[in-house]
Amino acid sequence: MTPGACVAPAEAGLVARAAAGDRAAFATLVQAHQGYLRKLLGRVCRGDQGRADDLAQEAFVRAWRALPGFRGEARFRTWLTRLAYSALSAERPALPLVDDAPPDPDAQDDFAPGADWRIDLDRALAGLGEAQRHALLLCYGADLSHAEAAQVLGWPLGTLKTQVLRAKARLRKQLGAWETTP
Amino acid sequence: MNDFDDDASFDDALRQRLQDGGEPDDAGFSLRVMAALPPPVAAQQCRRARWVRRVQWAAIGTAACGATALLAGAGGPLDMPHALAVAALMGLLAFWSIPSRWSRG
């Protein structure tokens, strides 16, 4: 793969200028990606937007330092997400490693279909283990490919796919009452 | 009512739920990030510094070899031009090597 192959041409120019020390180009990149990153991290931090913003800021500062070494082999957004997860891991080393921890039993036991399936989906999501939640957030919330999500989390691709499948199976089981019956 | 019979519709529902809600407004976040950035060290500057160091060491090596060859090649006492050449090379050696020692991290 040629350097820069995964970065859009307009963005590749900005990335190259920022890597050469152009702060205005980096500011444009920050403005373009801050909304995506803060929204994703807000979900990762379960709604704690203050902490999410601190993590996002740390990710951008790390990106500024590491940009001269960025060769464009991944999308800038994927690379930035990876840096944000590195910051998250530095803050809480237990995350986001693959875990086999049992889900929150309360979330499972009192689960029952409510008036709005979205509420039930949120409750079911809250009952997932951390690894499965991160896998779903990246693949469905951030719309990253499985390969990109695996890269962000530092997992083998097969592990990521397994976690996504398990998470979906668990959610479908819990949301079974919403399935259409013939 | 949602039909989750097939995997694709469940995927769509999941994606929609996890992506709903707008992205937060910038509200000064970009300015806060820019204020937190450390001073830039451009890649070009790093590359240039690396090349300068290499050229410096090559020049030091060449001067040392030249001075050694001149001193070893002279059977007896050095004549004026040879002595001047040796002195010049030794001066260059000192000039190039002492600052590079200082600049070493």
Image (spheres, grey):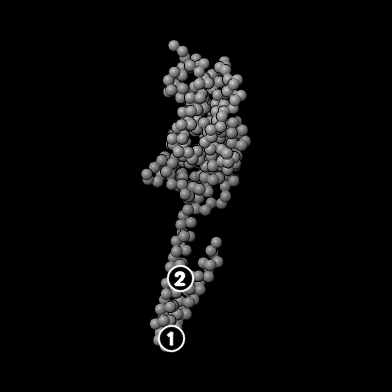
Viewer-closest of A6 and A110: A110
In the rendered image, the vertical position of residue A93 relative to residue B9, given as above or below:
below
| Residue B41 in view in this figure | yes
Residue depicted at 45% across the width and 76% down the height? B89
Q: Classify mark 2: residues with Cα within 10 Å, few (<14), some (14-19) or many (20+).
A: many
Question: At label 2, which amino acid type do we have?
Answer: Ile
Which chain letter goes with mark 1? B
Q: Which mark is residue A95?
A: none
Residue depicted at 42% across the width and 72% down the height? B62
Residue at image mark 2:
B60
Asked if the residue at tag 2 contacts the one at tag 1, i.e. Cβ–Cβ closer than 8 Å, the answer is no
In the rendered image, the vertical position of residue A12 relative to residue B74, given as above or below:
above
Which chain letter goes with mark 2? B
Extreme left residue here? A1
Question: At label 1, which amino acid type do we have?
Answer: Leu
Residue depicted at 42% across the width and 74% down the height? B65
